[in-house]
DNA sequence: CTGAAAGCGCTAACAG
DNA sequence: CTGTTAGCGCTTTCAG
């Protein structure tokens, strides 16, 4: 840390060229003769010049950074999504700013507010799909990720939640189950709401009347909450409790697994299981768990690409991409 | 989007005060009379003024953001660390910029270079502990996280890797095992190197001569690589292959688990297992896995706090915090 | 307590 | 191809 960092002016002086020429060579824009460029490069190297991105952002109006607001990076789903987003953005020279909303609309709003001027665009997985606190327009290009918001017509990338859920539940029904339960978080997010809808649709299509005692609802996205809710649902009498269960995300699956073990229910004999969202451990446990797999990495990449395109063409028509899911049948569902 | 965002000048005009007064009220610094403040606040609200953080950063020399460079956010360890860092920084008004190095020193260098001017300080989990490509000084406050770098005297937060590893291996030996193997990634990172050292120390203390056939080394931090390496190590004859294995991180544990199942080795009867780094699924599999648990969230929080302190007192003495680990014995080790 | 004015380091016209 | 010169929107002296 000798004197503070050299600036374009310092480099220009040392290279014996004008400020503008040095700026152009350093910034990589406009025309510069090979000779001048060489002189500038040499001077920059000697001085250890490193561009100040903050100044560049202020002058150019572009920060070359994008913000990502997720519910919780600790959720393996969002961890993989972030990775996908980073993969799409990095080659284009963008930096990723990350924030957690903790699935709380108020925190989400604060995160967006804090990021908005520091980025060229935002990617957000909205915590709530409707209501007074729903995601506000940050006044910059915005891409909704994994979930949508009622009444917002913006670019989005989601998966076929309802169809995936329906398929999983149909599969359970096809194994002979009638009392098919569900372990789910609150329906605040659009994706969870759709998965619940898909579950109900499958029951209805099979002529099964839904029973509220088959739904284990826990307000949060936590395994602990799911554990408790599942425990109470499965503690009902042998004759009434579900013989098969569908879970709406990996935390719910975790909680259910804990509950089933605690109650000494054998899977799939006493309880068949099918989960939404495939995570590593589903193939590590015994028996391995049947799951609706989502193209998670691709979801992140696609969202990143969508934002990149929007940044390039602000007036392009709104695109809503929906990715297909797949059902991977494993032993837990008894097939 | 009507006209572009209102600036301090717009607010000042509307409020009928000078530019400087409006700037002070809006920026929250200097003295402003209650009356002037009220006028400014009202004008700001009417106009929908939102501060431009980029301009503020350029003028003030502080971005109120910090960068975090991790090996891979998809690693649950780093996901939790990020969460801890965010928890420590957010209350102080800092934003988190995240980058993955993919455990590659060259990418790490690029990430640091890309972030350096956009942040007030950096937190990095260095990919390499030594060598030509080792972490360079970004010229800003830097805190090393989880791992250290030879010859760099900077703030750092790590865990007791060697001691934790030794304790796990001693535990395995105490169950009567002599041929204790290890599944590990390359020793590029200081933490892995220390865990390997801890393993060797335990063998030595027990008077066991280390055998290279007991080490399954895979270059990368991936479960797939660990799987292959573990498979080959465990495929040796009954008489020579390890009867117990220690894994150096959660990806290694994952790979080993896959290999053991594939070879139909019963745990702990045919193979006792003790892992470094406790992750969710270790208690979901059968049998649950004995593990060295690290205070991961605390590691992130502590690192965040350390950076905050350094930012406040640039000349404070260098602090190296080392957090204790704990061994949680479960069924996989046969105790 | 308030006002005027000088930058922060860079990009981007605009002339030459 | 090169140089000059305004700003970007804010913080921060320095006077008043």
Image (cartoon, coloured by chain):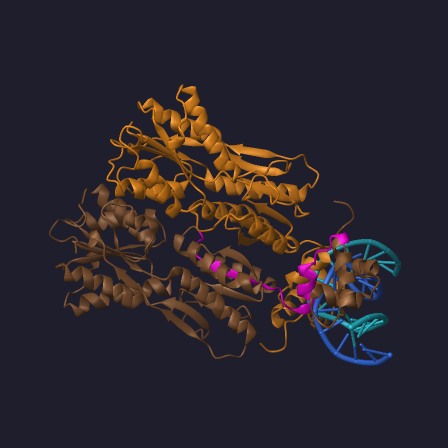
Chain colours: A orange, B brown, C cyan, D blue
Residue B226 position (above or below residue A214):
below
Question: Is residue B67 found inside the magenta-colored segment of the image?
Answer: yes
Residue B57 coordinates in the image, percent (x, y):
66, 64
Report if residue B12 lies within the magenta region.
Answer: no
Tell me how many marks there are.
Answer: 0
- Image coords of residue B268 (percent x, y): 17, 50
Quadrant location, the C terminus of chain B: bottom left
Taking A296 as reference, is A63 left or right?
A: right
Left or right side of B215 for A24: right
Seen at 78% across and 48% down, the residue is B3
B115 vs B282: above or below: below
| Percent x, y of residue B151 | 42, 74
Residue B192 occupies which quadrant of the picture? bottom left
Compared to residue A268, the image places residue A51 above or below, namely below
Towards the viewer: A133 or B20: A133
Q: In this rendering, does residue A19 appear at all?
A: no
Residue segment shown in magenta = B46-73
Left or right of residue B300: residue B119: right
User: Which residue corresponds to the image point at 59% horizontal and 34% vertical from the top-left?
Assistant: A320
Decide if residue A38 is on the left or right side of residue B301. right
């Amino acid at each position: 840390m000798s004197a503070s960092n050299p600036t374009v002016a310092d480099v220009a002086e040392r290279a014996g060229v004008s400020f503008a020429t040095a700026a152009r060579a350093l910034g990589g824009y406009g025309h510069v003769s090979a000779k001048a460029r060489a002189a500038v490069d040499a001077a920059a190297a000697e001085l250890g010049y490193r561009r100040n991105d903050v100044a560049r952002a202020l002058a150019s109006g572009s920060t070359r950074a994008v913000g990502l607001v997720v519910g919780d990076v600790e959720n393996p789903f969002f961890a993989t999504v972030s990775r996908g987003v980073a993969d799409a953005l990095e080659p284009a020279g963008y930096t990723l700013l990350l924030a957690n909303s903790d699935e709380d609309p108020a925190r989400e709003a604060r995160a967006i507010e804090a990021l908005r001027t520091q980025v060229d665009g935002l990617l957000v997985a909205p915590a709530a799909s409707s209501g007074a606190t729903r995601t506000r327009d940050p006044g910059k290009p915005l891409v909704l990720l994994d979930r949508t918001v009622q009444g917002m017509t913006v670019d989005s990338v989601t998966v076929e939640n309802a169809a995936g859920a329906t398929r999983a539940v149909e599969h359970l029904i096809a194994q002979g189950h009638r009392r098919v339960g569900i372990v789910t978080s609150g329906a605040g997010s659009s994706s969870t709401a759709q998965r619940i809808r898909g579950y109900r649709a499958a029951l209805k299509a099979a002529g099964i009347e839904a029973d509220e005692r088959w739904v284990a609802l826990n307000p949060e996205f936590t395994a602990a909450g799911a554990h408790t809710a599942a425990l109470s649902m499965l503690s009902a009498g042998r004759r009434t409790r579900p013989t098969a269960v569908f879970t709406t995300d990996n935390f719910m699956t975790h909680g259910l697994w804990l509950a089933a073990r605690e109650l000494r229910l054998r899977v799939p004999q006493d309880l068949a299981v099918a989960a939404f969202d495939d995570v590593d451990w589903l193939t590590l446990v015994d028996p391995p768990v049947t799951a609706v797999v989502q193209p998670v990495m691709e979801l992140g990449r696609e969202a990143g690409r969508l934002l990149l395109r929007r940044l390039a063409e602000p007036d392009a028509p709104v695109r809503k991409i929906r990715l297909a899911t797949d059902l991977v049948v494993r032993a837990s569902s008894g097939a």
